[in-house]
Every structure is written in structure tokens, then in C-alpha cells.
Amino acid sequence: MLATPLGATAELLKVLAARAPKGLIFDLGSLKTPLRGGLAALVDAGCRVTSLHPMFGPDTVLLSGRHVIFIDLGHAGALREAQELFAPTMAERRKLTSIAVVSVT
């Protein structure tokens, strides 16, 4: 999980892509455009990657009624595993597939 400042996240995604780890990789960035290159590199490297956007701030205590957006980058297993991390919570889990974050072919 990358929960780093946006400027650092883009570079860290590229570093991870070069290492191609086997574990689940996802970011928690609120903006996705700066991360496109790093996310695409992870997809191209065959990594288990997805992207999340929590629709609440760091001061949130309970997730009841809060939404977490899961962005499908083409790896169904990674998407499902990330969603399962929030299964014990009361957060509303939503999948987004109609965003041009990366080009998956």
C-alpha cells in the first residue's frame, strides 16, 4: 500500500514496477493523473495492481456511510483482494471501470 505524498508516490510506483513484486500493490492517492505512468509500468510488468480512492479524510473515525472507490486496472485478483481488505468495515465499496487511468490491452 502506498500512502505517501503524491509527488513521492509516482516515483515509488515506477521503482516497484522495476522490481515486479508478487504481492498486492495499490495506492491511496486522491489524484490519479500524476500516477498514470507508474500505474501503467506496474500493469506492463505484470504486477498485481489496483488503485483506491477513499472518499473521506484522515480525521474519519468510522467508515459507516463512507465510500472507497476501487479502480480496475485489469487485474481482477488484485481488485478483489483490495476490496476484501475493507470487507470487515462498514465502508461502501465501489468499483470504477470507466476511467482512463492507464491503457490496459
Image (tube, rainbow, N blue to C red):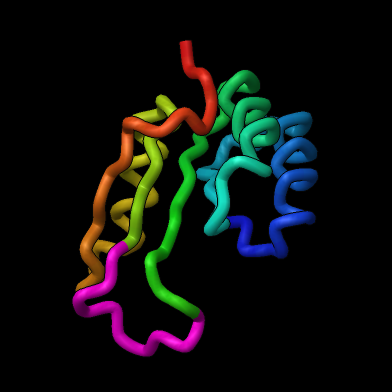
The answer to whether residue 80 is above or below residue 89 is above
Let me know if residue 78 is in the magenta part.
no
Where is residue 94 drawn, in percent x and y? 25, 51
* Residue occupying image coordinates x 47% and y 10%: 105
Q: How many marks can you see?
A: 0
| 46 sits to left or right of 51 | right
Along the viewing direction, whichever of 31 and 78 lies nearer the viewer: 31
Give the residue displayed 25% in from the left and 57% down from the top. 93
Rendering coords of residue 69 (x, y %): 35, 53
At 47% from the left and 88% from the top, the residue drawn is: 59
Q: Quadrant of residue 90?
A: bottom left
Hey, which quadrant is residue 42 in on the image?
top right
Vertically, is 68 above or below 21? below
Q: Residue at x 51, y 37 (%)?
A: 49
Q: Which residues are magenta?
A: 58-67
Magenta stretch: dominant SS?
loop
Quadrant assignment for the N terminus: bottom right
Horizontal side of 96 relative to 6 (left or right) equals left
Residue 56 percent across, percent down from the top left? 40, 73
